[in-house]
Image (spheres, helix red, strand yellow):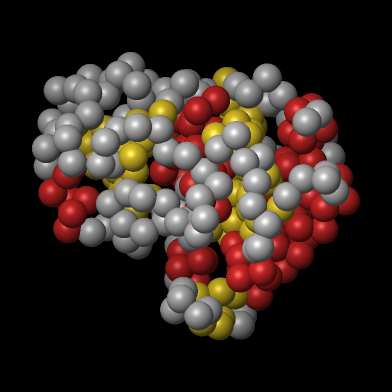
Amino acid sequence: MDYEKLTGVMRSLALRAGDRIMEIYGADDFDVKVKSDDSPVTEADEAADAIISAGLRAAFPDTLLVTEEQAASHGQKADTFLIVDPLDGTKEFIHRRGDFTVNIAYVENGVPTRGVVYAPAKGRMFYTLADGSAVEEDGPFDTETAGNTRPIRVSAADNGALMVVASKSHLTDETRDYIAKYATKEFKSAGSSLKFCLVATGEADLYPRVGRTMEWDTAAGHAVLHGAGGRVVRFDDHTPLTYGKDDYANPYFIACSPSVELKPA
């Protein structure tokens, strides 16, 4: 893979998709449908998926592409592939809460190694460079030319006063019970893959997810966090979270700074 090209293509497509999402977000009304798994999908999901899919297929025709909106048609399997959630946090989008993201990632041998997370309503964009390190780019954003970027790095966590982030729309009792095992200084809620990015920048130390997610929900944030020195492990045995599973469904997981002393499930 040409990582320099990959970085530029993913960044540009995320911005283009984000522009289209914001056009629909700013409209007085937009279509909302319900998928077979009872999750919502909007015209913004579908428009962003079309932009990103066309761009990735044109740039990397020999690489398997997996997207949330085309999940039902995925018959091929591979250890190395591109994976996309064109609008992560659809419920946040529908309720106009702003915590939604565009997620594009590259998975190699089951590990997300490159990715971009763009939160258009928040004006924040995080991605990996060609060498795999993670940065946040300052806006305003140009689709073709990167602006000023700053390296991001996980915190050196204080295990006596942890900063914890968890889901805004999917905060379960199991998650609350697990968080209660830690000494926490601050708790914040956030939507979509932004939670990974808050850990990556040191704005949070720990993000436990005791609830259902799919690989396209997590791969881009996982790649950014990995590039910032963080880790993502299974909730049950703390082994690394891997990708390319048969149904693309994740087990429960924990994303954190390596300095966090993880508690058992």
Q: Quadrant of residue 109?
A: top right
Image spot of residue 50 (x, y percent)? 76, 64
Say which residue appears at 79% left-offset and 41% top-offset. Answer: 9
Say which residue appears at 66% left-offset and 63% top-offset. Answer: 75
Q: Would residue 58 be found to the left or right of residue 75 on screen?
A: right
Image spot of residue 60 (x, y percent)? 83, 44
Is any atom of residue 189 visible in this view? no
Camera-side residue of 254 and 99: 254
Name, please, the residue furthest toward the right: 58
Image spot of residue 53 (x, y percent)? 76, 58
Camera-side residue of 233 and 88: 233
Which quarter of the rendering shows the N terminus? top right
Is any atom of residue 205 visible in this view? yes
Q: Would residue 175 be found to the left or right of residue 49 on screen?
A: left
> Taking 129 as reference, is 87 above or below it?
below
Q: Quadrant of residue 91?
A: bottom left
Say which residue appears at 35% left-offset and 32% top-offset. Answer: 239
> Taking 259 as reference, is 221 above or below it?
below
Which quarter of the rendering shows the C terminus? top left
Camera-side residue of 69 and 95: 69
> Taking 149 as reference, is 143 above or below it?
below
Say which residue appears at 64% left-offset and 59% top-offset. Answer: 67
Image spot of residue 32 (x, y percent)? 56, 81
